[in-house]
Image: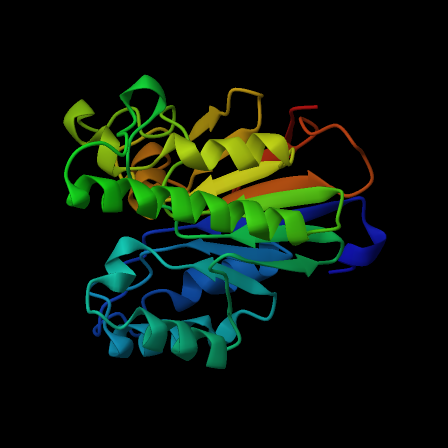
Amino acid sequence: MDTPTRTYMRIAAMGDLHVSKTSQGAFQPLFTQINQSADVLLLCGDFTDYGLPDEARVLVRELAVVKIPVIAVLGNHDYEGGKPHEIREILIDGGVHVLDGEATEVHGVGFAGVKGFAGGFGRGALGPWGEHAIKAFVQEAVDEALKLETALARLRTQKRVALLHYSPIRGTVEGEPPEIFAFLGSSRLEEPINRFRVNAVFHGHAHRGTPEGRTSTGVPVHNVSMPLLTRVNPNRPPFLIVEVPRDVTDTAAVERRTSGEPLVKSG
């Protein structure tokens, strides 16, 4: 694809693959289709099921058919086995750009990524009051937001994309039981996204959430959890393609499509 000469970049995004030791061969057809449809692939965490290095190795073998850049952030399942650093290294050795407060650039579009964390949204967000355990929980969300801010600040591109596992807004977790909203994301992640005028945000984690939402300043947020995309569009491959213009300045000027559908211009 001659991305440098085009006025837009095709971004394929998906999350929550939950690859197991027995997934060998299961994802290669899907990744082959993505490789033919997009300029970059974003993986929004939970690409392993139990956070085991062997699961990460299976994923790397599945990704061998992908020749476009792959950018990823870890999810909570990738921490479950207590070996997130080993999983990260396996993916990096396999050619994946794994972001944890870092930023990278592909063909003039900047990508900033963090896992994010829980804590709730808006007036329902948990505050740092009371027991040490509560304060430590809230501080984790604050630290993740600061990492995202640092990553976005490093970018010198006009176009910026944020890659998360946890949601930065309530809108894309709607559909989940309200009792667990606080564990699906944190509005502390929204502030740097708004301030740096991010063009598009992608996250996973909320399997029964809502595919699309917007921050308080109108930044589009996409929930690309694979179980959600499979449920919403059962007759289409479970990934989303968003086309980010490369030569306009309007943040809302993002063309979007679900794989197999005509493009819909949003700006």
Q: In this view, does 73 lie above or below 21?
A: above
In the image, 198 versus 212, the foreground residue is: 198
* For residue 197, side relative to residue 147 (left or right): right
Q: Which residue is drawn at 26% across and 79% down?
A: 54
Q: Which residue is drawn at 70% across and 50% down?
A: 109
In the image, 151 versus 209, the foreground residue is: 151
Let me know if residue 216 appears in the view. Answer: yes
Q: In which quarter of the image is residue 188?
A: top left
Let me know if residue 261 appears in the view. Answer: no
Relative image position of residue 186 (x, y in whole percent): 35, 35
Q: Quadrant of residue 3?
A: bottom right
Relative image position of residue 27 (x, y in whole percent): 37, 64
Look at the image and tell me in which quarter the C terminus lies: top right
In the image, 197 versus 257, the foreground residue is: 197
Relative image position of residue 242 (x, y in whole percent): 59, 41
Q: In this view, does 182 lie above or below 81?
A: above
In the image, 121 versus 47, the foreground residue is: 121
Q: Quadrant of residue 141?
A: top left
Q: Which residue is drawn at 64% across and 36% down?
A: 196
Q: Residue at x 26, y 70 (%)?
A: 23
Look at the image and tell me in which quarter the N terminus lies: bottom right
Relative image position of residue 44 (x, y in whole percent): 42, 52
Q: In this view, does 203 lie above or below 77?
A: above
* For residue 32, side relative to residue 244 (left or right): left
